[in-house]
Each structure stands twice: as C-alpha cells, then as structure tokens.
Image: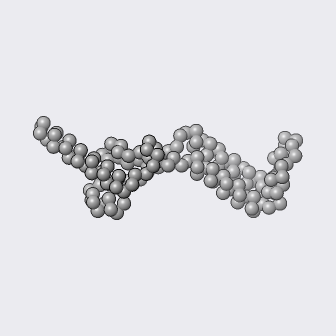
C-alpha cells in the first residue's frame, strides 16, 4: 500500500466491511445465541435431552465430565462457523465511486502490477474526461 501512496499521493484509501447475505447474518446470529445456551447448559449440568425423553449422546456425557474443555470446544468451533458465515472474501476497489476491481467477480486479488495498471488506466481516463468537459464548457 505504501507503494501506491508514493506513486499516487492524492489517492484516498479506505476499507470497510462488505456485509454477507442476510440469511448468513441471521444464521450466524442464531448460532451465537445457541452457543451461549449450550455453554450455559454445560456449566449448570442440565441435561436438555431428558426433557424430550431421549438418552443423552456420548458427547454430551463427555462434556459434562470435562466442562472446561467442552465449553472451549463449543466456543471455538461455533466462532469458526460464525466467522465463515460472516466472511464474504470481498476486496472491491472503486476510484471516484466507479468500481474498477471486484474480487467477488474475478475470484482473486489483483497483483501489484494489475493494481498499478488499473489505477493508471483510470487516472488517464479521468484526465481525458476532464479535458473533454473543459473543451465543451
């Protein structure tokens, strides 16, 4: 990024989050609440399977015997899934509010050479458009 700022000192670089689809956000939110419920049940030792008249699975029994490990496992595994749901992998570049690169469309990040070429082409185009508008005025 330092190379870009040295070459184009007037350019403004900003980053922001690109929100995932609403369904993924809702699933991640539900999973976050469910995680807290499961951790709470592990800590207090309540067997939710007994409410349904079902025998507790072996992993639940193991979790009751190893509460700290079970809580950590639920927490980290759930966070991993939540992060996957919330991650879009977006890397979108706009110049003067005009999209010039999209990782979502291309499937990959631009190389430094591609990025410089994109910026140079856009800068030339903007200069050309500015000179045309001045000639018409």
Q: Residue furthest top?
A: 136
Residues 113 and 129: in front is 113
Q: Position of residue 22 (x, y in %)?
A: 55, 39
Q: Residue at x 23, y 48 (%)?
A: 124
Numbered label tally? 0
Q: Position of residue 83 (x, y in %)?
A: 58, 51
Q: Position of residue 70 (x, y in %)?
A: 75, 58
Q: Residue at x 38, y 48 (%)?
A: 93
Q: Position of residue 96 (x, y in %)?
A: 30, 46
Note whether 73 is above or below 125 in the view shown. Answer: below
Taking the image as shown, residue 55 lies to the left or right of residue 80, namely right
Residue 68 shows in the view: yes
Residues 121 and 88: in front is 121
Q: Residue at x 27, y 51 (%)?
A: 120
Taking the image as shown, residue 71 lies to the left or right of residue 21, namely right
Image quadrant for the N terminus? Answer: bottom left
Q: Quadrant of residue 62?
A: bottom right
Q: Residue at x 32, y 62 (%)?
A: 3
Q: What color scheme is it?
A: one colour
Image quadrant for the C terminus? Answer: top left
Q: Quadrant of residue 66?
A: bottom right
Q: Quadrant of residue 68?
A: bottom right
Residue 44 shows in the view: no
Residues 4 and 74: in front is 4
């Amino acid at each position: 990024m330092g190379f870009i700022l040295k070459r184009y000192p007037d350019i403004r670089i900003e980053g922001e989050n690109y929100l995932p689809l609403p369904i993924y956000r809702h699933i991640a939110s539900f999973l976050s609440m469910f995680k807290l419920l499961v951790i709470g049940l592990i800590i207090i030792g309540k067997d939710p399977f007994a409410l349904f008249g079902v025998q507790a699975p072996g992993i639940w029994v193991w979790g009751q015997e190893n509460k700290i490990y079970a809580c950590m496992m639920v927490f980290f595994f759930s966070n991993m899934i939540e992060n996957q749901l919330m991650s879009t992998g977006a890397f979108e570049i706009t110049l003067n509010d005009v999209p010039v690169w999209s990782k979502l469309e291309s499937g990959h990040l631009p190389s430094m050479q591609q990025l410089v070429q994109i910026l140079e082409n856009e800068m030339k185009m903007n200069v050309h458009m500015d000179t045309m508008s001045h000639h018409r005025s």
